[in-house]
Image (cartoon, rainbow, N blue to C red):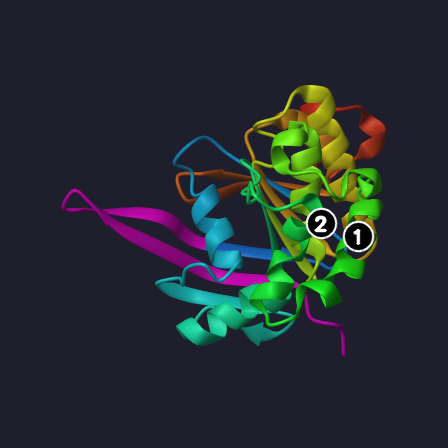
Amino acid sequence: MPEPAMLELSDITKRYRVGGQTVVALDGIGLRIESGEFTSIIGPSGSGKSTLLHLLGALDSPDAGSIRFRGEEIGALDEERQSEFRRHRVGFVFQFFNLLPTLSAWENVAVPKLLDGTGLRKAKPRALELLDRVGLGDRAEHRPAELSGGQMQRVAVARALIMDPPLILADEPTGNLDSTTGASILRLLGEIAANGNSVVMVTHDMGAVEYCDRVITLRDGKIGSNDKVDRTAGSGADAVRA
């Protein structure tokens, strides 16, 4: 029997009430994401990208349809089980880093462990190991104000990995970085996927395509395309194939 996909969505619908009107954010989405796959979700503002990311991370629940994580239904989890899923199965990377300014780099990485009940001293070795993995072993004691934007994002990536989650969700991770620094973060996320994690990234940047395995475009709450990336075809839109 084949191994279930990391994520499998069937007929996902999500609606919101805005100003007395009903807005359909996602309209019958179907999607399959495999382990070790770096997937980019691209689309204009209002296309449903952020809503989809929130559903994948159990930050919200669909109005209809099924979301399965390794074969287990997560779309209808209660609040307590959603929280448990987020703590242990998902690592989040955000555009604006969300680091605590009074903590050092390694302490920021260790925060999810602390929230899960692990003492700071016990969490430190793993936090230092992850900082070394993302190329910041020599900046472990520095606070966010002493780091560049790219370094802060690397700390955020290390923090996302501290609980060893199989799924990494990245919301515009390069949106606050220059192109060179952003490319280094994309390569890092690609390396993480190559090690077996599934990485799903929301972005406006078509230049990110060349670093991904799959590109999904959303428009008006529907999937417009779902293509694998041909890395031998150059960069940008030319690299995408059906």
Q: Which residue is tagged 2?
A: 106
Mark 1 surroundings within 10 Å by alpha-carbon count, few (fewer than 14), some (14 through 19), many (20 or more): many
Disc 1 to disc 2, how far (Cα)? Answer: 6 Å
Quadrant containing the N terminus is bottom right
Secondary structure beneath dot 1 equals helix
What is the quadrant of the C terminus in the image?
A: top right
Dividing the picture into quadrants, the one containing residue 19 is top left
The reply to whether dot 1 and dot 2 touch (C-beta < 8 Å) is yes
Mark 1 vs 2, N-terminal side:
2
| Residue at image location 53% in from the left, 36% down from the top | 96
What main secondary structure does the magenta stretch of the protein show?
Answer: strand
Locate residue 176, reporting x and y percent.
57, 27
Residue sitting at the far bottom: 1
Residue to which mark 1 is pinned: 128
Q: Would you say residue 156 is visible in this rendering?
A: yes
- Provide residue 105's location: percent of width, then percent of height: 69, 44
Disc 2 packing (10 Å; few <14; some 14–19; many ≥20): many
Disc 1 marks a residue whose amino acid type is Leu
Q: Is residue 16 magenta?
A: yes
Image quarter for residue 99?
Answer: top right
Taking the image as shown, residue 199 lies to the left or right of residue 128, namely left
* Residue 67 position within the rendered picture, expressed as x and y whole percent measured from the top left: 51, 66
Q: Residue at x 66, y 68 (%)?
A: 119
Residue 150 in percent (x, y) is at: 69, 30
Name the foreground residue: 213 vs 128.
128
Closer-to-camera residue (156/85): 156
The vertical placement of 118 against 109, above or below, is below
Name the residue: 61% across, 31% down: 145
- Tell me the SS state at disc 2: helix
Report if residue 239 is visible in the image: no
Relative to residue 9, is residue 44 depicted above or below?
Answer: above
| The residue stretch that appears in magenta | 1-28
